[in-house]
Image (cartoon, rainbow, N blue to C red):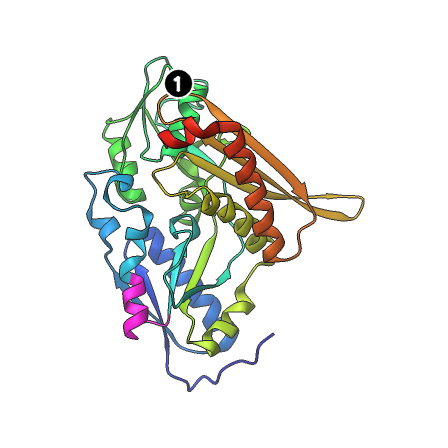
Amino acid sequence: MSSAPSASSAPWVIATRESRLALWQAEHVRDLLQQRFGRQVDLLGMTTQGDQILDRALSKVGGKGLFVKELEVALEAGRADLAVHSLKDVPMELPEGFVLAAVLEREDPRDALVSPRFESLEALPEGALVGTSSLRRLSQLRALRPDLRIEPLRGNLDTRLRKLDEGQYDAIVLAAAGLKRLGLARRIRQVIAPEVMLPAAGQGALGLEVRTGHPELRLALTDLAHQPTWLATAAERAVSRALGGSCSMPLAAHGDWHTAEGQHTLRLRGRLGHPADGRLVSAERQATVTTLAQAEAMGQAVAAELQAAAGPEWLAAL
């Protein structure tokens, strides 16, 4: 454990988006830091381009990096010391001078069906209207239920739930983690098994980003890291990085841990959708993983299998 900075030190400032979920996440990290170090931690709330542009798909306007750019500007200018992100929103390549200092223990990584009338994906009637703007979810829904109508759904979690409650959709698909963190687990009608809908890389995990030139804070944040989550998400993100993954690619990657005969192994699964139809290709590896380098190598191997299974024509279409 790193030595605790003195309580008299200047406060650390966390840059965060201002949605209710983002503020919950930042407050969670603030409380952990204050409990661990007895040091004041303040929040700097910000509205990002990703929060402002709601009439177009993220893949059309710059990708998930729109949710983190302004926070990085605040870090670079010295107005904040760290940023708290939903890890699935963090680009696979960080700008020079920035680094993930820690990944916290993951909440439920699965997707969830929310609907006022239907208890499961299987129960949705033919032609039901489902809301999601995730190409990953869309491709897997299309493979599972080609009879459904799938329409874009943007906005923060509360906005999406409001649109559902107004009757604009029969059901929507959201990350289970966000609903649970905000005390909205009762809204979940079905937690969708990864075998049915494989999650996004990093889903359910929080990443803490800092400037590389802030060694005291970077060292302190390692005390909050959850190594099994960090290794699993590093493998997942390596799949996406190797495929050039972004929100414009229908790509899923998920790692989970298994224990047998005293051996702890990481299973990594990847799934890639076709942009024009309901086809999917899948790949899977399982191995003992104890370092980030091993995790990333595993992700690269799964990505190579997906590339080989999809073939050049499929990849060119993506």
Tell me where residue 64 appears, x and y as whole percent: 33, 48
In percent of the image, x 44 and y 36: which residue is there? 251
Q: Is-magenta flag for residue 96?
A: no
Instruction: Please say if 225 is above or below 109.
Output: below
Residue 132 is left or right of residue 307, and the answer is left
- Residue bearing the label numbered 1: 124
Tell me where residue 114 appears, x and y as whole percent: 38, 31
- In which image quadrant can residue 225 be found? bottom right
Quadrant assignment for the N terminus: bottom right
Instruction: Please say if 98 is above or below 1.
Output: above
Which residues make up the magenta segment? 71-81
In percent of the image, x 24 and y 49: which residue is there? 51
Amino acid at pointer 1:
Leu
Q: Is-magenta flag for residue 73?
A: yes
* Secondary element at tag 1: loop
Q: Is residue 178 visible?
A: yes
In percent of the image, x 30 and y 62: which residue is there? 71
Q: Residues within 10 Å of mark 1 (few under 14, many from 20)?
A: some
Front residue (pair 315, 191): 315
Quadrant assignment for the C terminus: top left
